[in-house]
Amino acid sequence: MWLRVMRKGAAYLCPGMLLLAVAAMLSGDLPYREAAEPYPGSGTAVAYVVLSGVTWAAGALVLGGIVIVAVSSCPDRWGLLSASTYLVQRTVVASAALWFVGSVVTVPVSVAASSGVPVVKLIRSGIVFEVLPAVEEAYAWIVSAVCAAVVFLVTSPWPRWNPTVLAAIPACIGLMAVPVTGNVAQGPDHDIATTLAFGVYVPLAVLIGVRSLVGLRGMVRRTDADVTADTRARRRVVMVSLLAETVCLAAGLVLVLWLLAPGALLTESVYGRCCLAGGIVLVILMIADVRELRCGGAEITRLWSVLSCVGVAALVLVAAMVRLYTAPVLPRHEFSIWDVYLGYELPDPPSVLRMIGVVRFDFFLGTASLVLAALYLWGYLHLRRRGVHWPLNKLLWWLGGCVGLLMGTSSGLATYSSAMMSVHMGNHMLLNMYASVMLVLGSPVTLALRALPAMSRRQGLTGPREWVTSLMKAGFSRVVTHPAFTFIVFVASLYVVYFTPLWGMFAKYHWWHLFITIHFTVSGYLFFWTIIGDDPGPRELPHIARLGILLGAMPFHAFFGIAMMSLDSTIAADFYDRLRFDWLADRLHDQWVGGAIAWGMSEIPILIVAIALGVQWFRSDQRAAKRLDRWEDAGKTDDLDAYNRMLHEMKSSR
């Protein structure tokens, strides 16, 4: 079966490569003339389009396979995949290897294409590594190669559910590395365009991967379960495809309107016509999915499979052409320093009203905060309808954390934080300590385990409740929730990000700000979860140890603020000195204010955490005392004492 599937994949790949090559040859030097860049020659131009298209499609196959494994598998108690999805997981491994090789090969080709030099001439000259630092896209392909290698190393040893599903994290990072360096990263409003790109390319990759695997036939065929489970698995795959198409179409429509020149039509440029063709393909695939679901999903029809193969080929071609051509809005725009470094202007100084009222919605993290709030509300109301009590204060804590995340990503606070170190430190404290603490106090995992229905293995599939339980027991979870790990990441991140060249190197890229936002929010959540988290986890610390961790982190955070206040030079001076404001005369003083904010604002959340820890400690002692009272009332204390003496004697005899 494996050889048969590989032959099908090869037969599917070769026409796709030919299609990409023909499209690149027909394009000629037009994309380079539109971008005012030197033409590297037809050989290099065609090679870059084919290599980048096939490599990104291989990454999409990885992500799509991971999604299929996640939603349509029923692993055993050791986490090993069922026979129905074993082949999909092995395809993920093979695709990751192809993704890695393709990314490595594409690095010098991307350098040559961006430099306007034939790739053979560039390699023979021996200056690839000298030119590479000036090509942002080459760095993106290096990141893609690293992520592909991580996916391969994680998934290749054993066909297990946990590592395969967790490999989706590096897969998404690797797939987004190249798109965020293209049209969306240039010009006015590139901060908003970058966040929209996540809503386009991640669902697009899922769609391409899922439909490719299902279109090759037999990839999700279940041989070890009854017809009912088989039908449910197919319906899940089709529903995932429909959801990906809907999100991709909606985000893509907004993004295309953003990147079109004012008053321009889609048909006026090659870029617009490619986007229009992609939208039509998505609509056709959506209609096919709806029809498939109405038929009951008992069997993937031949029409659905054929449309999958043709649609995937068209979408890969469209994605390659969209990355090749320049968005119409860019050549017609006169770039300013604000367009290059921020994407927007800040003519007025920050104020309380502007911090709240100036909204630049983050379509990635802002949407995530709204979705998290909606899911928690659904779980809360679901428990209420079942008559199960859930504390109102936990709901309020969670909603408060979601509001904090929304404010830290989509309000004026986020807008000014990219240009001012003082506001950035305030935003950092909001996400890293305030929002994280409130999210932890919401106990989302416990709510999910109570609200989500359990599914029996006899049903042939697992559900969201089983997914949450499995991930909480995974080895990865044991590592990232270990007190030593969370403490080091929480404390060291501040010094590594701001007291090394990292911030100065990447501050002008909006993807860096997204990464930093996610990193500090997640690291803060994990750190405070080890101290005051009520959710079940791999290990439970005694309260005295939790207090020790909290007290141990306090001086490091305070010292960071004091160290920043004591600096006599500006962090990321090359970046901040280019952003000159009439209302901001002294950058060093602004940095001093940022250090003071980092020092002073850290005390309040630590006080909240200390109070919450004290309350939890008190309640834990109360529960232990009541449990002992029940033992005494039942006359079982003698048995308990005898049992404890036996354990003590056994320990002493070793």
Image (spheres, grey):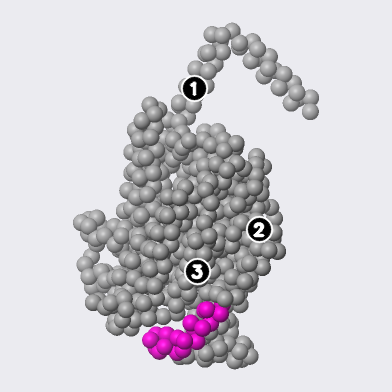
Which residue is located at x 61 percent, y 12 percent? 637
Does 235 appear above or below 572?
above
Element under disc 1: helix
Q: Which residue is mark 3?
A: 310
Which residue is located at x 53 percent, y 18 percent? 627
How far apart marks 2 and 1 lie (CA) works out to 49 Å
What percent of the width, then of the height, locates residue 21? 53, 82
What percent of the width, then of the height, locates residue 3? 70, 64
3 or 1: tag closer to the N-terminus: 3
Does 556 appear above or below 117?
above
* Residue 647 horizontal side relative to residue 367, left or right: right
What segment is highlighted magenta in the picture? 17-37
Q: Which residue is mark 2?
A: 90
Q: Which mark is residue 623?
A: 1
Specify the amino acid type for callout 1. Answer: Arg
From this viewpoint, is residue 537 visible?
Answer: no
Q: Residues within 10 Å of mark 3 (few under 14, many from 20)?
A: some
Q: Given this view, does label 2 or label 1 mark the residue nearer the observer?
A: 2
Image quarter (top left, top right, bottom left or bottom right) of the C terminus: top right
Specify the amino acid type for callout 2. Answer: Arg
Does 244 appear above or below 531?
below
